[in-house]
Amino acid sequence: MKKNAQTTLIIIAISFGLIEILFLGESFKKESIDLVIAVAIAWFIGRQYDKMKFYMKRTRESEDNYKQLIETLPESILIHNQNRMLYVNKAGENMLGAQRKSEILGRSIHAFIYSKDYQELATRRLKQLLEKSILSSNVEQKLLRLDGKIIFVEVSSRVIIFEGKEAVLSTVKDVTDKRQEAEILLQKSEKLALIGQMAAGIAHEIRNPLTSIKGFIQLFKSKYKSDEEHFNLVLSELERINLIVGEFLVLAKPTAREFKERQITSLLKDVVMLINAQAIMNNIQIFLECESDIPHVVCEENQLKQVFVNILKNAIEAMPNGGIIDVKIKKKEKNRVSIYFIDQGLGIQEDRLLTLGEPFYTTKEKGTGLGLMVSYKIVESHDGELKISSKVNRGTTVEVILPIVPKGHAGK
């Protein structure tokens, strides 16, 4: 701590005392006592002044360091008082779509809140905060950026002292992407629920007349040999309808599943043998490659076979010019197994990958999207994951990740 004021006041006191003694002819004894008192007072006042100046400097330095720290934080920090913006850090500046802090500072916080309802919510929360002076929990808000973009945020606030005055510090987190993901999941869930209801109501009703129609078509086919080609076409379309109805039933009907320990390598060999005839007809070869010591998995065998058949059929249909499909089984960390299906097909555009697995969304001309959705559902029921990566004209890789023992089936 520097003692500039203390030293200066002591020098001044001594100087005045000596002047009085030397030039004004005052009594040396009396003036010596006064000088000592004056020096003591000067020492005390100077010391207090230097201390005050020292602590004020430290406070300013601490505040500057605090501002620098806040400025570098990745979270958006807003400080406001009586609804007026006093401070915003760089992250907050970017979040609100500003080019400069001056576009934000001094403005009302209500200028950035999207609607009247959210403004009223903010007013109520701030009132409660100022009355109780406690940290508020995360509250969702809807903000309007300076560029007109609407974002969803979570805000937590507390009362602080800023530049000597009471103010509110709010930490703001942009949750727009998380909110959109939640809405997509909700929409997907609603679609699944709707599909289930539709399936339960109409699947069996469709199959009954379908069986009758199929029987009559086969009868007409044997009777009118000249139109056999047309009857075969009708029968193939009826079979496709029957397949779609079957996929509906998988979604609607919670069938009893019996999980047992199975060798995944043996299971895949059976599927490849089953699908190989179709592959050869399309000039496609399927190669199965397995690591050694692949552990057994606890699964519902028939359902997993359905998943693998769906994936291989999709791969075959994506390769109109033929080629090779590689099927690889590898051990993964944390007691999991990965099965890779790698084709050399047409590939899928990146913007379409996000919507794969939704009902009625498909890249095929005559597809329904239900096969892949059923596959997702089966893999999820095994506590697994189904991941798809693809490049246009380079091919697609489907990875099925399965735990050795799904949750809820341990010890069975």
Image: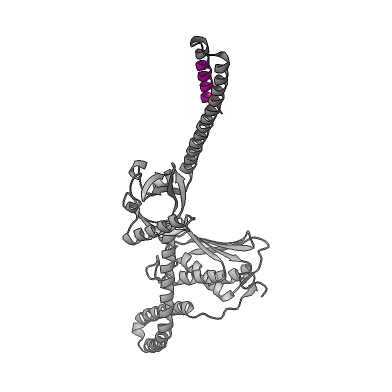
Residue 295 horizontal side relative to residue 132, left or right: right
Residue 343 seen from this side = no
For the magenta stretch, what is the residue range?
Answer: 1-18
Q: Nearer the viewer, residue 189 or 365?
A: 189
The x, y position of residue 41, in whole percent, is 54, 26
Q: Residue drawn at (46%, 70%), measured in percent from left and top?
A: 373
The x, y position of residue 186, in whole percent, is 43, 68
Residue 113 horizontal side relative to residue 59, left or right: left
Q: Main secondary structure of the magenta part?
A: helix
Q: Quadrant of residue 141?
A: bottom left
The x, y position of residue 327, in whole percent, is 56, 62
Q: Residue drawn at (44%, 42%), measured in percent from left and top?
A: 164
Q: Quadrant of the C terminus?
A: bottom right
Above or below, 309 relative to 53:
below
Q: Nearer the viewer, residue 82 or 407?
A: 82
The x, y position of residue 407, in whole percent, is 61, 70
Q: Quadrant of residue 177?
A: bottom left
Q: Residue drawn at (35%, 55%), measured in percent from left and top?
A: 113
Q: Nearer the viewer, residue 203 or 409?
A: 409
Above or below, 350 relative to 34:
below
Count of residue discs: 0
Above or below, 115 relative to 380:
above
Whether 15 is among the magenta residues is: yes
Q: Nearer the viewer, residue 71 or 259?
A: 71
Whether 328 is among the magenta residues is: no
Residue 186 seen from this side = yes
Please, which colouring scheme is shown? one colour
Q: Quadrant of the N terminus?
A: top right
